């Protein structure tokens, strides 16, 4: 009976797997993959994996670039032509011989929501501080609590239905899988001393879960969270994608040494202004703790300027970052707690340790120490713990001392000896390295953030075509800030360009590349290039950047922005038409005035830097009051659910009534983010406005020099209608010159258009010639050459934009200046 039940489970659920080499060629194909997509192994092995994709392969390569793992929904082509949207988990693996490939796994059928228990049982499971996972009798995962999700850095929905070796490939997972099989068959718990992941400890227990009849129904995997002691790592080693944290390094020191080395301990770091950090204790005032070889002696490292600073000060200011004691010590009532500032007198153990730059052992019965303990709130823990022997160890790191660790033993234990001193030095050295790394990371992140923010728009430019709100959220990973950016660029003819881009990589180089690309986009936009042509020029620029960086740094880890995605859109409030082109970027979403939400159908185009591939532009009409949302893919990569659910949430948030566009942005981010994002997020939301017929007027003009007088008269009459008589003289001069140039050097048809936009007046003259006019300085006896010079002097801005056929020469003037 049990065998039949297991066989039925195997029939209902199976796993499809495939491997792909670095060149994108399929190298293996499982029977589950055959059942899923209908292809036999000989039909697909040796072929490009992109042949099975229902989307362009460039996007897939960009998504996987620089990643060790990815999960999400991809469209795959069945042998019969159907398109299947499947959730997959992709791992990058490197063998001992250095060969790298990708393992792709998917649990089939779609992972249904597993049944939940009673509320109290459910709360216990979900909120347990220990990572817990439940596997069915087929050894496939059916449940994972929140702590296990954090340990895996994957939501339960992404791995449900998969076996442990597919979730975390490796020898440890294979051994755990075999142990689960033994627990399933024997009905007895199994304990294994294997570390399954960077967030999991070395001790893992596999417990058979039995029904009322004693039959094993599932296996529960439980593990302790990893610490520096049981994981065999130092505090400087942090899981991939997780930023180093000096508070965590300090707490790991406390957990490592208590109670093995001491009954209680505290860690105090040199205090600094809080504004120098991002959520952590700031970079230490190195001048107050420099340890650079001034004195000699056993264990001494010297103190240099730090000694002078300590001697000059009446008290050394430290900040308490960690406290730990055996269970019966209790809370240190009345003393300084974690996060509080501690002022240590110069004769206190902590100050003397920093002053001499070496470990020191104190007997708390010594009158000097006893006097300090009696009056200093920072020493209340010594009294509460009944410490008889006190050991002070400086935290030394390259660049200077960071602080001091104080270890205490009660009177019923032996005082600290030479071996204890050695162990304490080793532990504090590891903690100091971790804290220094955390501070360096914080400083580097702050620098990158400052660069990133300096390169993003500080204020949005004045324009009347769109109401705009933006958001930028930097990544919370160890890799640091990425290269996401957005921009709003006013164009001629009252049009506005919207840009959102995502540079591959993180850190200073990604931010610098982002700045160069954003500058290039603004320069190309100023030339009024169509969106598809602009992306073509940007693609060439990325190729040149990659070539320059490769020649300058052949061993560098950067590709000069290759794989960068970008979306460029131009909105015209006169025609209410939006022209868009994208380079591997997610499509924008639009909300119509009646509340309907949809994606704008824009050809995907390849990411920038691939070269030789075309970009296509598309046009869409947007009714006045429509909402346009542009974003980067970090908005979905930060999700805990599948892509379809994330899209539904985004559409619901965009369609939700809101008082302002800022509220719309907040609704989107609240709906999709449950924690700090793993990738940068840029979000730009714009509501369209329109210039109505009473603000725009156009005339077709014959190709005849005598029409110039008529053009001036029409302009004067229209300005009178608009009540702009003060601007008539200047505008007539510009219209006269522009129309004359179009008749003399251009080709019919010729059109004159005036646009009254708030405080600006725009004159445009179109002709069918593609020749661009150039301004030159006329010599004394020249009969021509002064027209454009006059226009440039009269207008605030002027220029030429090319259409598919012909060109438009435009001049814009401020009406406020005209009325002064």
Image (cartoon, rainbow, N blue to C red):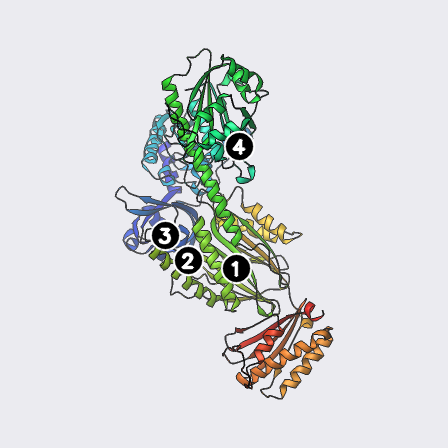
Front-lying residue, 162 or 757: 757
The reply to whether discs 2 and 1 touch (Cβ–Cβ < 8 Å) is no
Q: Secondary structure at mark 2?
A: loop
User: Mark 3 to mark 2: distance in Å?
Assistant: 16 Å
Q: Which residue is mark 1?
A: 499
Question: SS at mark 4?
Answer: loop
* Residue bearing the label numbered 4: 271
- Which residue is tagged 3? 37
Is any atom of residue 81 visible in this view? Answer: no
Q: Comparing marks 4 and 3, which lies closer to the viewer?
A: 4
Q: Looking at the image, which is closer to me, 35 or 614? A: 614
388 or 288, which lies in front? Answer: 288
**How far is the residue under mark 4 from the one under mark 3?**
61 Å
Position of residue 372 measured from the top left corner of the image (x, y, whole percent): 54, 18
In the drawing, does residue 625 fall left or right of residue 22? right
Closer mark to the observer between disc 2 and disc 1? 1
Q: CA distance from mark 2 to mark 4?
A: 54 Å
> Among all residues in the image, which is located at the extreme left?
97
Q: Is residue 769 visible?
A: yes
């Amino acid at each position: 009976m049990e065998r039949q039940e297991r066989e039925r489970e195997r029939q209902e659920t199976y796993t499809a797997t495939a491997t792909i080499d670095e060149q994108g060629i399929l190298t293996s194909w499982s029977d589950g993959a055959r059942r899923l997509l209908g292809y036999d192994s000989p039909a697909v092995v040796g072929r490009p994996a992109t042949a099975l994709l229902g989307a362009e392969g460039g996007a897939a390569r960009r998504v996987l670039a620089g990643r060790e793992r990815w999960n999400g929904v991809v469209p795959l082509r069945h042998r019969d032509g159907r398109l299947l949207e499947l959730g997959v988990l992709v791992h990058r693996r490197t063998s001992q011989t250095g060969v790298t490939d990708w393992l792709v796994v998917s649990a089939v059928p779609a992972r249904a929501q597993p049944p939940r228990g009673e509320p109290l049982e459910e709360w216990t499971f979900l909120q347990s501080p220990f990572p817990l996972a439940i596997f069915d009798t087929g050894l496939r995962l059916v449940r994972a609590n929140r702590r296990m999700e954090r340990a895996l850095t994957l939501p339960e929905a992404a791995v449900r239905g998969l076996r442990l070796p597919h979730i975390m490939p490796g020898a440890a997972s294979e051994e755990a899988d075999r142990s689960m099989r033994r627990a399933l068959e024997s009905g007895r718990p199994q304990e294994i001393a294997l570390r399954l992941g960077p967030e999991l400890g070395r001790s893992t227990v596999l417990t058979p879960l039995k029904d009322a009849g004693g039959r094993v129904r599932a296996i529960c995997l439980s593990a302790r969270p990893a610490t520096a002691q049981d994981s065999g790592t130092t505090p400087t080693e942090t899981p991939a994608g997780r930023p180093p944290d000096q508070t965590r390094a300090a707490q790991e020191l406390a957990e490592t040494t208590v109670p093995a080395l001491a009954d209680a301990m505290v860690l105090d770091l040199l205090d600094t202004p809080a504004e120098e950090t991002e959520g952590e204790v700031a970079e230490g005032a190195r001048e107050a703790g420099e340890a650079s070889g001034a004195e000699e002696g056993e264990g001494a490292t010297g103190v240099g300027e730090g000694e002078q600073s300590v001697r000059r000060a009446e008290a050394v200011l430290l900040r308490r970052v960690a406290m730990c004691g055996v269970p019966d010590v209790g809370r240190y009532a009345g003393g300084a707690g974690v996060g509080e500032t501690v002022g240590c007198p110069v004769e206190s153990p902590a100050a003397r340790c920093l002053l001499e730059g070496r470990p020191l052992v104190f007997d708390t019965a010594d009158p000097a120490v006893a006097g300090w303990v009696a009056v200093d709130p920072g020493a209340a823990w010594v009294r509460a713990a009944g410490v008889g022997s006190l050991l002070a160890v400086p935290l030394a790191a390259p660049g200077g001392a960071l602080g001091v660790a104080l270890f205490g033993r009660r009177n019923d234990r032996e005082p600290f000896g030479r071996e204890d001193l050695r162990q304490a030095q080793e532990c504090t050295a590891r903690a100091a390295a971790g804290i220094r790394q955390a501070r360096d990371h914080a400083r580097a992140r702050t620098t990158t953030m400052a660069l990133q923010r300096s390169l993003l728009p500080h204020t949005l430019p004045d324009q009347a075509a769109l109401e705009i709100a933006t958001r930028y959220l930097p990544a919370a990973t160890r890799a640091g800030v990425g290269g996401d950016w957005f921009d709003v660029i006013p164009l001629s003819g009252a049009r506005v360009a919207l840009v959102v881009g995502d540079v591959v990589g993180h850190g200073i180089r990604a931010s610098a590349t982002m700045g160069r690309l954003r500058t290039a986009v603004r320069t190309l936009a100023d030339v009024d290039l169509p969106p598809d042509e602009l992306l073509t020029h940007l693609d060439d620029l990325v190729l040149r950047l990659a070539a320059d960086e490769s020649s300058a740094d052949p061993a560098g880890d950067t590709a000069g922005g290759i794989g960068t995605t970008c979306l460029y859109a131009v909105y015209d409030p006169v025609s209410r038409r939006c022209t868009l082109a994208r380079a591997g970027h997610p499509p924008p979403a639009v909300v119509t005035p009646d509340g309907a939400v949809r994606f704008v159908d824009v050809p995907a185009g390849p990411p920038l830097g691939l070269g030789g591939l075309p970009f296509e532009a598309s046009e869409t009409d947007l009714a006045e009051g429509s909402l346009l949302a542009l974003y980067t893919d970090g908005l979905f990569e930060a999700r805990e659910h599948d892509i379809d659910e994330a899209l539904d949430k985004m559409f619901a948030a965009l369609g939700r009534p809101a008082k302002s566009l800022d509220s719309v942005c907040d609704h989107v981010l609240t709906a999709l983010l449950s924690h700090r994002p793993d990738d940068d997020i840029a979000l730009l939301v714009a509501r369209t406005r329109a210039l109505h017929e009473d603000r725009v007027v156009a005339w077709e003009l014959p190709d005849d020099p005598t029409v110039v007088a008529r053009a001036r008269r029409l302009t004067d009459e229209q300005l009178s209608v608009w009540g702009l008589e003060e601007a008539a003289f200047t505008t007539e001069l510009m219209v006269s010159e522009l129309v004359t140039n179009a008749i003399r050097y251009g080709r019919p048809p010729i059109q004159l258009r005036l646009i009254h936009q708030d405080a600006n007046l725009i004159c445009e003259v179109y002709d069918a010639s593609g020749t661009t006019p150039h301004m030159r300085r006329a010599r004394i006896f020249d009969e021509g050459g002064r027209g454009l010079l006059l226009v440039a002097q009269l207008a605030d801005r002027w220029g030429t934009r090319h259409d598919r056929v012909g060109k438009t020469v435009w001049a814009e003037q401020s009406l406020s200046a005209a009325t002064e």
